[in-house]
């Protein structure tokens, strides 16, 4: 099965193409983006975007991850969103970044809703979790708006650039999502898979 493209009211969540590499390098290469994430290197050198994009198909085929480009309906790249999949436990670890020019426009919130619909629908997951750095509370607000519950602070869980980093953990369960007790029912944006 090919990785699908997901549609939300304003966005396409689609597989990356090699032609996205220059935009990925430009957006991910912003020090402010790297500062707010655990996995984006800085500086973001030539060839890194291409290597990263090529890895997506391999991971999708292996069932270990799915990575989407977040693009506007006219296909302008805004960022990325992914799920690292733990199939035996039907669990996904969500991660995302948005290019700095597009912060504060609701892009991440809409993309998270879209990928949760996919996670609890076609992927059949039971739990989706995500974490953010304490210095990035905007990311926590995105998770809250998606109906994810804060589960706690994991002290010094990651080593990034020579410094141990705390992360705040959030998660949402399938039963919460399906019961309508989480935020997806309050959004005005319909989400569907094509």
Image (spheres, rainbow, N blue to C red):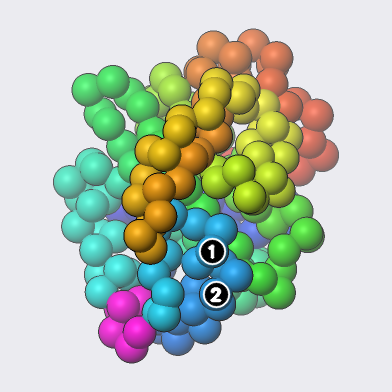
For the record, the magenta segment spans 45-50
Relative to residue 134, is residue 87 drawn left or right?
A: left
User: Do callouts 2 and 1 mark residues in contact (Cβ within 8 Å)?
Assistant: yes
Query: What residue is shown at x 39% (from left), y 69% (from top)?
Result: 41
45 vs 60, nearest the viewer: 45
Can see residue 70?
A: no
The 10 Å Cα crowd at callout 1, few under 14, some 14 to 19, many 20 or more, is: some
Query: What residue is shown at x 65% (from left), y 40% (from top)?
Result: 140
Can see residue 134?
A: yes
144 vs 107, nearest the viewer: 144
Q: Position of residue 2 (x, y in %)?
A: 30, 53
Q: Position of residue 102 (x, y in %)?
A: 71, 68
The verdict on residue 28 being magenta is no
Q: Position of residue 151 (x, y in %)?
A: 55, 21
The verdict on residue 49 being magenta is yes
Establish if 80 lies above or below 76. above
Distance from Cα at disc 2 to Cα at disc 1: 6 Å
Relative to residue 41, is residue 169 drawn left or right?
A: right
The 10 Å Cα crowd at callout 2, few under 14, some 14 to 19, many 20 or more, is: some
Residue under pointer 1: 35
Residue 9 - label: none
Establish if 89 lies above or below 179. below
Residue under pointer 2: 31
Relative to residue 113, is residue 46 drawn left or right?
A: left
């Amino acid at each position: 099965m090919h990785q699908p493209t997901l549609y939300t009211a304003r966005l396409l969540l689609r597989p990356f193409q090699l032609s996205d590499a220059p935009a990925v390098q430009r957006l991910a290469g912003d020090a402010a983006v790297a500062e707010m994430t655990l996995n984006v290197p800085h500086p973001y050198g030539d060839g890194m975007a291409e290597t990263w994009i090529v890895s997506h198909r391999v991971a999708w085929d292996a069932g270990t991850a799915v990575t989407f480009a977040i693009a506007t309906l006219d296909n302008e790249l805004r960022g990325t969103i992914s799920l690292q999949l733990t199939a035996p436990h039907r669990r996904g670890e969500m991660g995302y970044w948005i290019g700095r020019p597009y912060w504060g426009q609701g892009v991440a919130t809409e993309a998270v809703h879209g990928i949760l619909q996919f996670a609890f629908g076609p992927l059949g997951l039971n739990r989706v979790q995500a974490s953010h750095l304490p210095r990035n509370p905007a990311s926590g607000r995105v998770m809250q708006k998606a109906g994810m519950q804060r589960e706690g602070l994991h002290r010094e869980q990651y080593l990034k650039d020579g410094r141990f980093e705390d992360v705040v953990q959030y998660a949402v369960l399938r039963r919460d999502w399906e019961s309508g007790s989480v935020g997806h029912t309050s959004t005005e944006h319909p989400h569907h898979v094509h």
